[in-house]
Amino acid sequence: MASESIESDQFTAARVSYVIESAIYALAMLLGLVVCCYTSRRFNSNYRRHIVLAARLVRFKISLTVADLIVLYVYAPTQIIWIITYNWYGGDFLCRMTKFINTFSLHLTANMQVLIAADRLYITTHLRQIHQKSHFATNQMIALAWILAIACALPQLFVFHVYILPDGKPQCVSVWTVMRFREYVQQEVAQAHYLKHTAMGLTSTGDDNITLAGNFDDMSNPLVDSSMLKVLEHGNLSCSR
C-alpha cells in the first residue's frame, strides 16, 4: 500500500509539473508576440531619428529577434506537443531538423548578445569614427555569427534520430540516450532472469542473460520500463500513458 501511494503521488506530481511547464511555454509565446510587436515599433522610431547608429544596432537586433522567435515558436510548441502526446510522431527528418533548429537558435542568441555588447563598446570608444562604410563590417560580423551557430548545430542532424521503444512508441532521442537505455534494459533483463534462475535453483545463467539482453529490441518484456528512455533524454519523471 505504501509503495502504491508513493507511485500515485509521483504520478500526480509529474502531471502537475507538465501542466505548469506547458502553461509557461504558452504564456511565453503570448508575451513574446506582444514584445515582438512593441520592439518592431521601437526599431522604426529609433531608425528614423538616428539612421547611422540605429542601422547598426537594428541589424544585430533583427538577428537576435529571429533567434528568440525560433525559441518561442519552434522550441516551445514542440515541447508542448511532446508533453501532450509524450511521443514523437513527426518522423526522423523532422526530429533531426527540429533539434538542429532549436540548437541553432540558442547558439545564435548567444552570438548576437556578444556582438551587441562588443558593438556598444566600440561605438562608445569610437563614436566619431562611425560612418556608412561600417555597415559592411557589421554585415560581416552578423554573417560570422550565423555561420558559427549553424556549425555548432550541425552535429544535431547526426546525433538525434527516431528510436522505437520496445512498447512500439517512437521517441526523438540522441544516440547516447539510446546507448544508456540499452545498458539499462540489459541490466534489467539480466537481473530478472538471474533472480528467476536463482529461485529455481539453477546456477548457469550467463548464456541466457547474454542472449536475452542482446535481443531486447525484439521482445516486449513487462520488466522493461520503456519510459526510462524518456527520463534519460529529458531528465524528468514520466507519466504513464
Image (cartoon, helix red, strand yellow):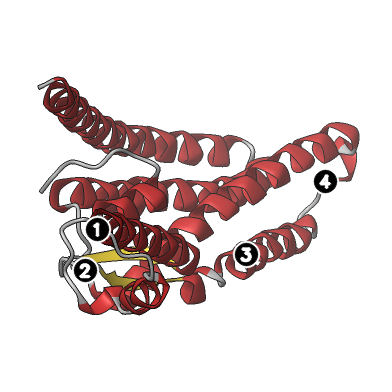
Task: State left or right for residue 219 relative to residue 71.
Answer: left
Report the amino acid beneath label 1.
Answer: Lys
Report the amino acid beneath label 2.
Answer: Pro
Task: State left or right for residue 10 relative to residue 205.
Answer: left
Dot in front, 4 or 2: 2
Q: Mark 2: give few (<14), some (14-19) or many (20+) Cα within 10 Å.
A: some
Residue occupying the point 21% across, 45% down: 83
* Label 4 or label 2, whichever comes before in sequence order: 4
Determine the CA span between mark 4 and mark 3. 32 Å
Report the amino acid beneath label 3.
Answer: Cys
Q: In this view, does 112 lie above or below 16?
A: below
* Label 1 sits on residue: 196
Determine the CA span between mark 3 and mark 1. 48 Å
Q: In what element is the residue under mark 1?
A: helix
* Label 4 sits on residue: 130
Which of these two is toward me, 43 or 26?
26
Residue occupying the point 25% across, 50% down: 77
* Label 3 sits on residue: 152
Q: Is residue 161 above or below residue 78?
A: below
Determine the CA span between mark 3 and mark 2. 32 Å
User: What is the x, y in percent for residue 185?
Assistant: 34, 62
Are dots 3 and 2 in contact, CB under 8 Å? no
